[in-house]
């Protein structure tokens, strides 16, 4: 069995340290930018909540740009971030650079209407929530019911943005449904495929 293999050299490690330095993070935050480049999790939701609270206190008029590159993860955390984007007054712009899958789609769709964009080489994945269920028969049924509720709500949110019916979204996402940015735009998931920051207004 292979262990963890690192191909980083010393200069790469120093660069990573510099990229994650408090000074750089502060500059990003001061530019009213949030970067989501990890799995969707309760820890991510907590971090995004904190940033939103401060940025909204500073200005309710200046937009907050959210860059997303995420394979998805916890559905509850994805919905929580979606709700928080809608909760605050400051307008939110979401931009996909990389992957937008599963729960990350909810985060992406939390932008103000018509303010969800994608860069040209991104990928989108719609699919139904699933989990490895264990426990007694009654517990399995309860969990299955909750998964079904999550699936229905997920499809409703996607349908509300794209103009599709919830049944159509459900059918499309019954199996992994991959889309290019152009296909996602045609589907109604993406407002516009952009190549310049000037286009994200």
Image (tube, rainbow, N blue to C red):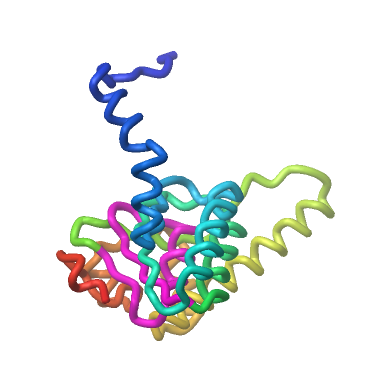
Q: Is residue 92 visible?
A: yes
Q: Residue at x 35, y 18 (%)?
A: 5
- Quarter of the image holding residue 83? bottom right
- The furthest residue to the left: 195
Residue 47 rendering spot, x and y as whole percentages: 54, 51
Q: Is residue 177 visible?
A: no
Residue 161 rendering spot, x and y as whole percentages: 42, 80
Residue 197 rendering spot, x and y as whole percentages: 20, 66
Front in this rendered view, residue 153 or 117: 117
Does the segment drawn in magenta span residue 9?
Answer: no
- Position of 19 compared to 79: left or right? left
Residue 65 rendering spot, x and y as whole percentages: 36, 65
Quadrant position of the C terminus in the picture: bottom left
136 lies above or below 121? above
157 lies above or below 81? below
Q: Residue at x 34, y 81 (%)?
A: 114
Quadrant position of the N terminus in the picture: top left
Front in this rendered view, residue 27 or 39: 27
Magenta region: which residues?
90-118
114 lies above or below 176? below
Does the segment drawn in magenta span residue 115?
Answer: yes
Q: Residue at x 38, y 73 (%)?
A: 63
Q: Residue at x 31, y 23 (%)?
A: 13
Number of marks present in the image shown: 0
């Amino acid at each position: 069995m292979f262990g963890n293999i690192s191909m980083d050299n010393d200069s790469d490690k120093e660069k990573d340290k510099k990229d994650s330095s408090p000074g750089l993070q502060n500059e990003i935050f001061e530019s009213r930018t949030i970067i989501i480049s990890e799995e969707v999790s309760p820890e991510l939701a907590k971090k995004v909540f904190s940033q939103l609270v401060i940025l909204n206190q500073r200005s309710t008029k200046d937009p907050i740009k959210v860059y997303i590159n995420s394979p998805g993860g916890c559905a509850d955390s994805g919905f929580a971030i979606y709700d928080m984007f809608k909760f605050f007054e400051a307008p939110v712009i979401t931009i996909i650079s990389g992957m937008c899958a599963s729960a990350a789609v909810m985060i992406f769709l939390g932008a103000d209407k018509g303010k969800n964009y994608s860069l040209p080489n991104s990928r989108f994945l719609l699919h139904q929530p699933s989990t490895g269920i264990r426990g007694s028969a009654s517990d399995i049924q309860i969990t299955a019911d909750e998964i079904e509720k999550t699936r229905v709500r997920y499809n409703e949110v996607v349908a509300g943005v794209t103009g599709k019916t919830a049944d159509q979204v459900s059918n499309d996402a019954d199996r992994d449904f991959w889309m290019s940015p152009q296909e996602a735009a045609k589907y109604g998931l993406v407002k516009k495929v952009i190549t310049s920051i000037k286009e994200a207004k």
